[in-house]
Amino acid sequence: ENHRTALNQLDEVQSSAALMADPNVRSQMVEHLMRIGDAAFEAQKFAVATDAYEKIFSIYYEEQKDIDVDGGRTLQLAIKGCIRCHKKLALEEERKDEYLKAIHHRNRIYQLLHTNKRTIPACQQLIMIAFLHGQLEQYKESADVLSDAIRRLFQGVQSFDLMPKDRISLLIRCYHMRAICYAKQQLWNKAFEQYDEALPLIAREEGMNSRDYNSALIHKSALLVTTGDYATALTTVNQYFKNVKDSLTVRQGLQLVDDGDHIMALDTLAAAHLKLGNVDKAIEAFEKKLAFVENVPKNDELKSATMHKLGCLLAYKKRHAEALPLLTGALEKRKYLYDTKSKFLFESSWAVAATSHSLGNSATALKEYGSLLEKINKIDDLPVDSVVIHNSAGKLFFDDGKIEKAIKAFKEALKSSESSRNMSSSLKADIRLNLANSLSAKGDIVASLKMYDEVLAMDSIQGTKEYYLTLYNQSLTVLKDGDLEETKLLLGEIIASRSKSAKGFKGNAYITLGNIALSEGNTNDALQHFESALKIFSNDPEELASGTQAKKSMAMTYSSLGLYDDAISTLEEAVEKLSQPNVEGKTFHLLKADLWSSMSRVHQQRGDIAAAK
C-alpha cells in the first residue's frame, strides 16, 4: 500500500545499467510500474501514479530498447493512465488557482495526445491551456496557443468545406477566444478579423439564433465601443436583441446566451447610447440590466454597481428624487461588500452626498461629505478627483452657512488643482469664484476682490457665462464695501455687453442698479431699471423668481411715490403668476408670502388698516 516506497525501490533497479540491459528485467519493471500506477490511481495518489506511468515511458523511449512483448498494449495503457493522472492533477491545481502548474500538466496531456495523433482531444487541451494563460493575463501566450490549435485543426484538410464537423465547433471557439486575446492586447484589427472569420462560420453551421453566434456578436459590439465606433456597436448589439426577440429558445423561457454575455450586451447598449448622447436610452438599458440581475445568483456586487450607475445617470438628468434611493441602496450594499478604504464605497458615498445636496437634504449630504473628507488621503486610486470633492463639499458648507469650512474646502481644492496638469480651466475658475464668494460672505472684502480679479483675468473664461457671473458677484461685493460708482461701472459692463453669455445676468444687474438708484433718491431711474429687468425676465419662464423680485421692487417704489394703486396692482399681478397650477416649490411659496407682506405694508402706508389685515 505504500506506493511511493515501492516506486523508490524500483528507481534503484532502474538506476542500474547492468540490470536494465536485461530484457526480462525491463519487462518486469514495466509490469511492476503499471501495477503501482494503477493502484496509486485507485487510491487517488495521482502524483505517485503519474510518476509510475512516466517511468514506463522512460523505459520505452529513453532506454530505446525493444520491450514490446504485447503489441504495444502496455504502452497504450500507460499513456491512458498518464493522461488521466495529469487531468486529475491539472484540475486540482486549477481549483487552487495555480494556473502555471495546471498548464504544465495540460501541456503533458497535449504531448501524449499529439504523439498518438488524436487531433480533437489534443486541440481541446490546447484550448484549455490558452484559457489558463488568459486567467494569468498572458494574452499573447494564449493567442499563440490558439494559433497552434487552429493550425492543427486545419491539418490534413484541403479546404474549409471539407473540414470534419467535429472540428468546426473547436475552430469557432478558437476564433472567439483569439479575438478576446487580441482585444486584450489592443490589437484591434486582428481582433475584428477573428470575429469576421467566426460570425459567418457560426451563422452557417449553427444559425444566427445559436448561443455561439450571439455570444460572438455581443463581444464584437463591446469591442466596437472600446474602439470608438459607437454607431456600429449599437447596430451590432441591437442585432443580438432582435435575435432574442425572434428566438424560439427565448419564447420557451430559456436564454439565448449565458448571464455574463447578456449583461455585457446591456452594458454595451448603455455605453453606446451614452457615447452617442442618448442618455435616456442608456437609462432604459440600465433599468433592464437592474431587473435582470435581480435573478442572478450571488448578485450583490453586480446589483450594487448597476444601481450606482443608473442612479448617477438619473442624477445627471436632474431626476434626483429617483436617483437617491438607488444610490443609497448601492451604498448600503457596498458597506457590506467592501472595506472602508474601497474606492467603490468612496464613489457611492460621493454620489449620495452630491445627490442629497441637490435635493436640499443637507444633513445627509454633510454626513457623507464628512466621511469623504476623512478618507480622501487614505485611499489609493480615488474614483473621484479630490479637487471635485473639496469643491463640492465647499459649496455644501457655503449653502449651509458654514463659511469657514467652505473657505477651507475651497482652498484645498485650489491647492490641488494648481498641482494638477489635467484639471480643466473651467473647474479652476469655478473653484476661485466659489472661494471669492465665500471670502465675501465672511466679510474679507480685500481678499475676495483679489480673487474675483484673478478669475476675470483667466483667458479661458473670457466672454463666457462664468466671466459675467464673476463680474456680477464682484459688483455685489463692491456694493457691500460702499463703492457705488465702481458698482455701477461693473454692472454697466454687463448691461452694455452684446455677448449672449451676458444675457442671463442683465436682469439682476438692472435690479441692483434700481436698488442703488432708490438708495440715492432717484426713483424715476429706479423705476426705469426695474422695468428693464421685467422686460428681460418676462420672456423667460425659468426666471419667474427673479421677475417676481423685480415686480416687488417696482411696487415698493410706486408706494414710496404715493402711487398706491399702481403698487397694489403690480403686487397682485405677481401673486397671480405665482398662483398658477404649474408653479410649485418652497421658493415660490416663500415669495408669495413675501408679496402678501409687501401688499400689507402698502395698505398701511396708504392708511387702509382694514385692507392691511
Image (tube, rainbow, N blue to C red):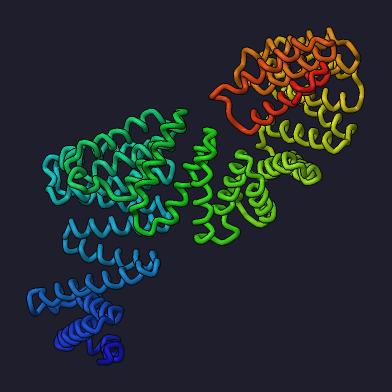
Residue 508 x/y as whole percent: 74, 19
Q: Quadrant of residue 494?
A: top right
Q: Nearer the viewer, residue 386 or 516?
A: 516
Quadrant placement of the N terminus: bottom left
Query: Where is 352 relative to 379, above or below?
Result: above
Q: Nearer the viewer, residue 174 or 434?
A: 434
Q: Quadrant of residue 268?
A: top left
* Left or right of 303 in this view: 468: right
- Can see residue 231? yes
- Can see residue 419? no
Query: Where is 118 relative to 159, above or below?
Result: below
Residue 173 x/y as whole percent: 25, 49
Q: Nearer the viewer, residue 214 or 10?
A: 214
For the point 32% across and 50% down, the residue is 259
* Left or right of 5 in this view: 521: right
* Left or right of 210 in this view: 418: right
For the point 81% across and 14% down, the residue is 559
For the point 72% across and 21% down, the residue is 549
Query: Where is 567 relative to 155, above or below?
Result: above
Q: What is the tally of numbered marks visible in this picture? A: 0
Quadrant placement of the C terminus: top right
Q: Quadrant of residue 40?
A: bottom left
Residue 575 x/y as whole percent: 65, 20
Q: Nearer the viewer, residue 603 or 294?
A: 603
Residue 581 x/y as whole percent: 54, 24
For the point 64% across and 47% down, the residue is 365
Residue at the front extreme of this rendering: 610
